[in-house]
């Protein structure tokens, strides 16, 4: 392994010989100079790993030298060392992107700590994270198999996402693979748990049941609305919990997260079913019966979610919330910019709902566009692309504006998505729906062991296309493929993000309550 090379520039370099000897004994290669001009010349002769730079030198000052170093070597770490504790000098140095700031007299241990922090930080974090997960691995495994309640499952899923994001920083491929296997095991047990309890949750037989799509407004949003002079509910379509966690740090510059919870999407975990249920406060068959003009069946022409505003209005009326409200759906960049312009006009409303559709479009685009496939090749890249979009989106402008106005917000979603990799064969007639994670129809042919089947749709409040219609749902990372041209479609859709079925990622989704700072 090559030695770490250090350039130390200080006009009193002779007085620092003990420090330099200490570093050389520790295996570092140290080059020295007593002025900024020579430091710049030396940097051109060979690569260096880090620079220690005195702030007060004759000729070029430390700040001037720092600026010139950053112009030529923008990624080279520079540690500023100074006798002065003046805040303005610190501000100048930090503004020029230093890596560390030490005040004389420095001792060898301070120098060593700064080196480790700047050059070995990633390695040390990786090793510490790997060790911490290894310690938690067995405990998490025991929890997964411990006959959990729906609340305990949300806590387990939060832990899994936490470790998934932490281990993403690690370069240990082995431990990352172990995490993936543990997540797959959790998904296997979770899907069995939902299959055993889902009908009881909806029928009222269960003593304890989770907040689901159709009860989210009543249980979580309306009580908050009653306490607020104004509330914005922002629904980002198809936002998974891990995606929320990567957005949270930049949102927290403007908002304090009061609560960060998970609720359960209904099945099918798609926009047509879950989001209509959320805004209506009703299950699909109840919408179909109570508001037939607002429900569009699978086999009917037209957009399946074109009446969300009307359904929201009906739910507000049903629960005696006679308030002024708005509903805005954003499907494009232009629509997002128009929303930002219109925000001052929305301030008169007690309740404002924004549906933002980018993440869902990203999921579909990743399936259909080779460029997006390459940009979001795996889970970390998918999260990263979500973050990059958000940082430059009108939605981030919306959140900053609302923060300035001290408006509380709720951020949530209607369902998540899962990265699929295992094709499951199904045969259906021409009227069978096209979704890859669930199928409904009258003549479905499939292996019953490979799916979660609902032979009587009325038990789960789902519309019946005809008397013999049933629903089947994929579990975990499965997806449906027809026997015709099977290999082509199996390869085309493998490793794409889909929704509609049964997995932790699709069903346990975020609802976060934020208070303006």
Image: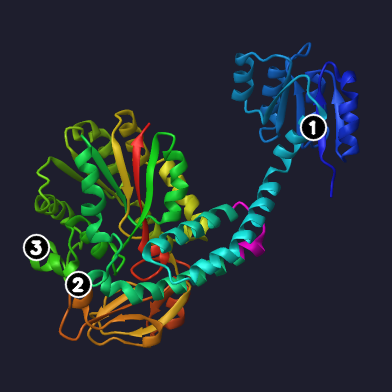
Region of the chain picked out in magenta, as a range: 169-177
Quarter of the image that includes the C terminus: top left
Looking at the rendered structure, the secondary structure element under dot 3 is loop
In this picture, residue 235 sits left or right of residue 498 = left
Q: Secondary structure at mark 2?
A: loop
Give the vertical position of 147 relative to 398 (above or below). below
Point out the residue furthest to the front here: 207
Residue marked by disc 1: 109
x 20%, y 34%: residue: 229
Mark 2 vs mark 1: in front = 1
Q: Position of residue 275 (x, y in %)?
A: 25, 59
Image position, residue 463 (x, y; %): 18, 74
Report the front residue among 56 and 428.
56
Dot 3 corresponds to which residue? 291
- Which residue shows up at 48% across the image and 71% down it? 146
Q: Picture quarter containing residue 106?
A: top right
Residues under labels 2 and 3: Cα distance? 15 Å
Residue 456 in the image: x percent, y percent? 22, 82
Task: Say which label, 1 or 3, has the lower sequence index.
Answer: 1
Badge 2 density bin: few <14, some 14–19, many ≥20, Cα 10 Å: some
- Contact (CB < 8 A) between labels 2 and 3? no
Circle 1 — which element?
Answer: helix
For label 1, count other residues whose C-alpha is less than 10 Å away and answer few (under 14), some (14-19) or many (20+). few
Q: Nearer the viewer, residue 347 or 356?
A: 347
The residue that label 2 is drawn on is 461
Where is residue 41, by image quadrant? top right
């Amino acid at each position: 392994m090559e030695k770490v090379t250090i350039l130390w520039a200080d006009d009193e370099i002779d007085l620092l010989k003990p420090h330099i000897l200490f570093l050389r004994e520790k295996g570092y290669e140290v080059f020295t100079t007593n002025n900024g001009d020579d430091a710049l010349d030396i940097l051109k002769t060979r690569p260096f790993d880090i620079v220690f730079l005195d702030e007060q030198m004759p000729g070029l000052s430390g700040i001037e030298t720092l600026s010139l170093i950053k112009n030529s070597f923008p990624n080279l770490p520079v540690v500023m060392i100074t006798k002065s504790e003046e805040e303005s000098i610190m501000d100048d140095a930090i503004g020029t992107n230093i890596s560390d700031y030490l005040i004389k007299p420095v001792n060898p241990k301070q120098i060593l700590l700064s080196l480790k922090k700047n050059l070995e930080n990633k390695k040390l974090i990786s090793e510490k994270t790997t060790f911490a997960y290894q310690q938690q691995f067995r405990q998490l495994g025991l929890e997964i198999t411990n006959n959990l309640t729906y609340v305990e499952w949300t806590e387990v899923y939060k832990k899994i996402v936490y470790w998934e994001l932490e281990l993403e920083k690690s370069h240990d491929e082995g431990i990352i693979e172990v995490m993936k296997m543990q997540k797959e095991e959790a998904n296997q047990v979770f899907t069995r748990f939902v299959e055993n309890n889902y009908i009881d949750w909806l029928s009222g037989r269960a003593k304890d049941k989770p907040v689901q799509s159709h009860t989210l407004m009543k249980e979580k949003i309306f009580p908050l609305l009653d306490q607020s002079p104004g509330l914005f509910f922002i629904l980002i379509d198809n936002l998974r919990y891990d995606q929320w966690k990567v957005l949270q740090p930049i949102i927290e510059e403007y908002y304090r997260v009061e609560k960060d919870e998970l609720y359960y999407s209904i099945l099918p975990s798609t926009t047509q079913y879950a989001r209509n249920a959320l805004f209506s406060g009703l299950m699909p068959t109840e919408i179909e019966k109570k508001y037939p003009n607002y429900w569009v069946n699978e086999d009917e022409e037209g957009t399946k979610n074109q009446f969300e505003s009307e359904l929201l209005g009906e739910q507000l009326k049903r629960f005696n919330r006679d308030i002024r409200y708005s509903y805005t759906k954003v499907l494009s960049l232009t629509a997002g910019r128009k929303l930002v312009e219109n925000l001052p006009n929305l301030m008169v409303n007690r309740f404002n709902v924004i549906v933002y559709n980018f993440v869902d479009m990203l999921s579909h685009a990743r399936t259909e566009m080779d460029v997006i496939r390459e940009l979001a090749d795996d889970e970390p890249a998918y999260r990263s692309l979500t973050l990059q979009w958000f940082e430059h989106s009108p939605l981030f402008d919306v959140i900053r504006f609302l923060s300035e106005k001290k408006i509380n917000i709720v951020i949530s979603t209607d369902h998540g998505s899962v990265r699929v990799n295992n094709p499951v064969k199904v045969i259906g007639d021409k009227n069978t729906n096209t979704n890859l994670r669930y199928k409904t129809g009258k003549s479905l042919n499939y292996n019953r062991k490979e799916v979660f089947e609902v032979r009587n749709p009325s038990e789960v409040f789902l519309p019946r296309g005809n008397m013999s219609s049933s629903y089947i749902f994929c579990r975990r990372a499965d997806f449906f493929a027809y026997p015709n041209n099977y290999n082509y479609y199996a390869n085309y859709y493998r490793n794409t993000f889909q929704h509609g079925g049964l997995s932790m990622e699709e069903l346990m989704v975020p609802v976060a309550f934020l208070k303006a700072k």
